[in-house]
Image: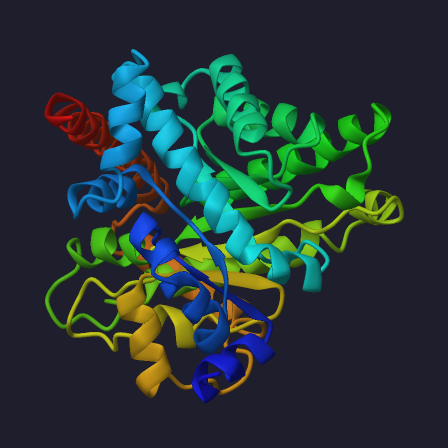
Amino acid sequence: MNERLKALADAGVSIWLDDLSRERIETGNLADLVRDSGVVGVTTNPTIFASALAKGDRYSAQVAELKASGADVDTTVFELTTTDVQNACDVLRPVFDATGGVDGRVSIEVDPGAARDSDRTVDIAQQLWKRVDRPNLLIKIPATEEGLPAIAATIAAGISVNVTLIFSLERYRGVMDAYLYGLEQAAASGHDLSTIHSVASFFVSRVDTEVDQRLPEGHELRGKAALANARLAYEAFEEVFGSERFAALKAQGAHAQRPLWASTGVKDPAYPDTLYVSELVVADTVNTMSEKTLEAFADHGEVTGDTVTGRYDESRAVITALEELGISYDEVVLQLEKEGLEKFDASWAELLETVQSELDKA
């Protein structure tokens, strides 16, 4: 295994790949990344699936079968994506077994059109869980206000969840509360809490993209907001999962909901390409990376120890300084959530269009 990636894993950061395709699975590339690069999980989204479908003909036979059976575009999307995720779960199953279910996870997203509909989100989550039928699956649910009760209900049903699209510290606390409430309900229903896992995907680079464009060129605070926000999220994680409330659940076998650093590819070429990996090294976290970021870290990434705890006051000072400049934290994170949902919707539309095109050709 690559020494730099091994050092990252040894520091407590689980390396997940933010990509999946049938080609990766069938050529053995995913298995190679697990063996050689320390990849212990996979995240997906509609854009990733649309990109995979548009390349080559590995999906053609299944598309033709589905078309012959009379499947519409929605059914075809459901079957194509769950097949890939199911097979990826099988590739990662040894990791799942070796880590007691902590890693070896593959995530699949609910239809983003349900992001504002709690009941529909829960229904889709249950359909995906039943169809993939693998214990190492995670259902991705956006952390909208309507998503919070859906997260709690899905966890309460014994289904493991990857909560996605978190930008604000306030919303993150709501996510953790929803997780704990879901565990409490699951326990009351007789579920084995040790089988339920969750991660909370805190988006990183987009915060800098939004804040930096509001700052003058060359300002000392450019490139500081995203890391400050993520570090303060970890402080909240330590507080909530060090609480008496969680201790009572932990005694029943519950697991902490680990923070997952998402959107860790660097958007600004002025910054080091491993910035959001090397500066967010801390135990009990996940960093989900594109292959480009993974390769960059394997080549020249540095692990210098814990780069998160002990930097909370410094991080608060960054947020305060931005506020004093008239850059509202609340406004920034609200804008990012709105844009995030719009991107989810656009990605889903792109996926449907790609699949419809494949059906038309079949």
Question: In x, y percent, where is residue 54?
Answer: 16, 42
Tell me what residue is drawn at x 26 percent, y 68 percent. 292
Tell me: residue 214, above or below residue 179: below
Question: In x, y percent, where is residue 40?
Answer: 53, 63
Tell me: residue 70, above or below residue 233: above
Quarter where residue 295 is shown: bottom left
Does 171 sit left or right of 227 as displayed?
right
Residue 149 appears in the picture as rendered: yes
State the colouring used for the structure image: rainbow
Quarter where residue 144 is shown: top left
User: How many numbered marks are there?
Assistant: 0
Tell me what residue is drawn at x 54 percent, y 20 percent. 122
From the viewer's side, name the closer residue of 230 and 311. Answer: 230
Which image quadrant: the C terminus?
top left
Tell me what residue is drawn at x 34 percent, y 61 percent. 27
Quarter where residue 153 is shown: top right
Does 203 sit left or right of 341 as displayed?
right
Tell me: residue 22, above or below residue 6: above
From the viewer's side, name the closer residue of 94 and 251. Answer: 94
Question: In x, y percent, where is residue 222?
Answer: 23, 67
Question: In x, y percent, where is residue 115?
Answer: 40, 23
From the viewer's side, name the closer residue of 221 and 301. Answer: 301
Tell me what residue is drawn at x 82 percent, y 37 percent. 192
Residue 316 appears in the picture as rendered: no
Tell me: residue 333, above or below residue 239: above
